[in-house]
């Protein structure tokens, strides 16, 4: 019984540590990490585009919106641009 209790407490401590570590950006900067390609300003500055946007450019099609950039979630922007 003692070994199980130590294991459970250790698991709670480890999970708590990882939850705290993952939320450090939110705690110190006040916002979540911008991981979406189309909304991350650093990725835009480096010229990184989502696969759908690159595919549409290679096919010679207009991009996902009127500003020629994918907007929001690139998964919501399909290659054929069908509704």
Image (tube, rainbow, N blue to C red):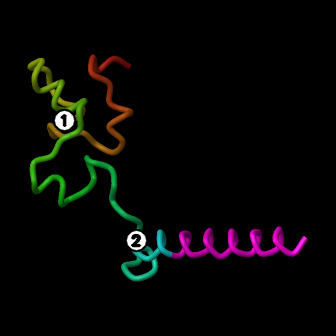
Q: Which numbered dot is residue 66?
A: 1
The quarter holding residue 30 reads: bottom left
Is 82 drawn above or below residue 74 in the view shown?
Answer: above
Q: Nearer the viewer, mark 1 or mark 2?
A: 2
Q: Quadrant of the N terminus?
A: bottom right
Q: Which residue is mark 2?
A: 31
Q: CA distance from mark 1 to mark 2?
A: 28 Å
- Looking at the image, tell me whether mark 1 or mark 2 is earlier in sequence order: 2
Pinpoint residue 71: horizontal percent, then vertical percent. Answer: 28, 42
Give the side of residue 48 with respect to residue 70, left or right.
Answer: left
Pinpoint residue 12: horizontal percent, then vertical percent. Answer: 70, 72
Give the side of residue 7 with respect to residue 76, left or right.
Answer: right
What's the residue at 26%, 48% (across, down)? 37
Magenta stretch: residue 10 in it? yes
What span is colored magenta in the figure? 1-20
Magenta stretch: residue 28 in it? no
């Amino acid at each position: 019984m003692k070994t199980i209790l130590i294991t459970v407490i250790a698991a709670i401590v480890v999970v708590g540590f990882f939850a705290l570590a993952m939320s450090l950006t939110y705690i110190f900067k006040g916002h979540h990490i911008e991981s979406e390609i189309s909304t991350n300003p650093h990725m835009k500055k480096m010229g990184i585009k989502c696969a759908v946007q690159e595919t549409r450019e290679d096919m010679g099609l207009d991009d996902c919106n009127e500003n020629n950039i994918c907007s929001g979630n690139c998964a919501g922007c399909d290659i054929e641009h069908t509704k």
